[in-house]
Image: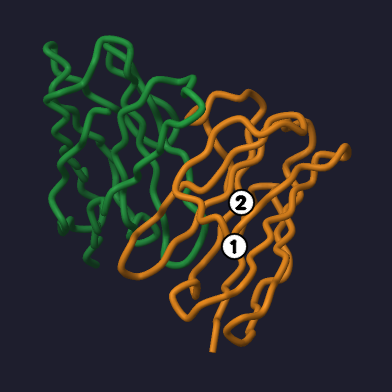
Amino acid sequence: DSGVTQTPKHLITATGQRVTLRCSPRSGDLSVYWYQQSLDQGLQFLIQYYNGEERAKGNILERFSAQQFPDLHSELNLSSLELGDSALYFCASSVTPSLYNEQFFGPGTRLTVL
Amino acid sequence: DAKTTQPPSMDCAEGRAANLPCNHSTISGNEYVYWYRQIHSQGPQYIIHGLKNNETNEMASLIITEDRKSSTLILPHATLRDTAVYYCIVRVTILNRDDKIIFGKGTRLHILP
């Protein structure tokens, strides 16, 4: 157990819909990262927040957005969903804004778009 | 952005040392070598990282060549629970705003009973 929690574990929805994925970082971690993992693309970095501010941006689509709240939990919003958005979405956290120093990953949310 | 090359898969007998290679011939002087692993459908797990010197922790050892163009992750006594995809990544620790983290496809390690 990494200490990072994600909800929901599974999500099934239809094309065109909007969903929100939630992440609670480990206690004391200020930085939150979001990743997408699909079968054909591997693990892709989407976005990072540090202490409420966007810190780094990866391959995040314009239909996706994220935010980090004052209590440090984060939400990833996915809108106008397409079949290709079906994937595992991971959240990770770390103490510092340094992206690679021991990020702790959550169990993931499996999104299925039908 | 230094790219890494890893073999797509490897087998190792249980109880033996698993040696996972990674080539990073274009690594820059300020880039670290990081290793993560991902057990089926779970979140990736940090293993170890290093800059120049060899590193060891409770999970593994990291051997970096003197020219830093390649490295080897060593799991000293592999168990069935070490079956996973292992990712080698080279990056600076603090990214610029528009940097992209690339995990690549990694090496799928099979531990054989």
Give the residue at x 21% y 43%.
B17
Look at the numbered disc 2 and give the secondary structure of its residue: strand
- Nearer-the-camera pick, B15 or A108: A108
Provide the letter of the chain coloured orange: A
Asked if labels 1 and 2 share a chain, the reply is yes
The quarter of the displayed image where residue B25 is located: top left
Residue appearing at x 57%, y 73% in the figure:
A110
From the viewer's perspective, tell me whether residue B5 is left or right of residue A23.
left
Pointer 2 residue: A91
What x and y, as percent, mark residue A7?
73, 65
Instruction: Indicate the chain coloured green by its letter.
Output: B
Q: Say which label, 1 or 2, has the lower sequence index.
A: 2
Please tell me how crowded label 1 is: few (under 14), some (14-19), or many (20+) other residues with Cα within 10 Å: many
- The amino acid sitting under disc 2 is Cys
Above or below, B17 relative to B84: above
| Above or below A82: residue A114 | below
Check disc 1 and report the residue beneath it.
Answer: A108
Q: Position of residue A107 (x, y in %)?
A: 60, 60
